[in-house]
Amino acid sequence: MSKIEKVLVTGKTHTTASSAGKTSRGHNGTLDIQLSSPGSATPAHVFNAIQPHPTAEQLFAGAWSACYSAAIGVVAKEMKLELPSDLSVDIEVDLGQTGAAYFIQARFEVRVPGVTQEVATALVHGAHEICPYSKATRGNIDVAFNVLTA
């Protein structure tokens, strides 16, 4: 994998749990989606505040955060861990360039308040192992994690 020398654009999302399902928001208000899992009774994807149009990196970060958040739920259930209501996932996806070549990279910041660092780290890495988006990008792009428990 090549390292990005120059970041051209960054798509950011912040995903939290809500009573109506997961909510993902872009960093500049251009993306506000209510997410649901297949077979879920919660609303299907709802786009609000679309103008100006979100970037492909922001849409990718939003889709990845939906999948990754669901994976966290699966791993938590396997660990017999009740997730905190204020759990959140922030994903930044950069489009960058090294020489004439273009690449993407991602950074995750996952907040799991109220659990130990060891448990939160196991949860975050377990979710990364089973999330289909994480599997699809594994070995293809740089992905970094920051796990917070406060």
Image (cartoon, rainbow, N blue to C red):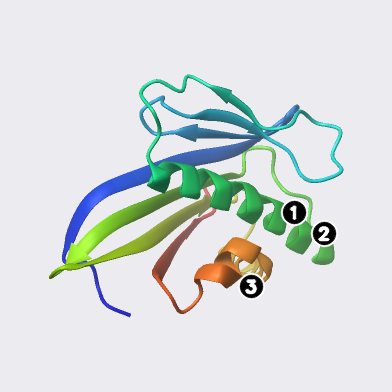
Mark 1 burial class by Cα count in 10 Å: few <14, some 14-19, many 20+: some
Give the label, 2 or 3, closer to the camera.
Answer: 3
Q: Mark 1 points at which residue?
A: 73
Amino acid under label 1?
Gly
Asked whether the residues under the numbered discs 1 and 2 touch, taking CB atoms below 8 Å apart as contact, a structural biologist would say yes
Left or right: 106 as drawn, with respect to 102: right
Q: Name the residue under label 3.
A: 129
Of residues 69 and 61, the one drawn nearer to the viewer in this rendering: 61
Amino acid under label 2?
Lys
Quarter occupied by residue 42? top right
Label 3: state its secondary structure.
helix
Q: Name the residue under label 2.
A: 77
Residue 59, numbered label: none
Disc 1 and disc 3: Cα gap in Å?
Answer: 13 Å
Of residues 48 and 110, the one drawn nearer to the viewer in this rendering: 48
Confirm whether residue 39 shows in the render: yes
First-in-chain label (2 vs 3): 2
Up/down of 85 relative to 73, above or below: above
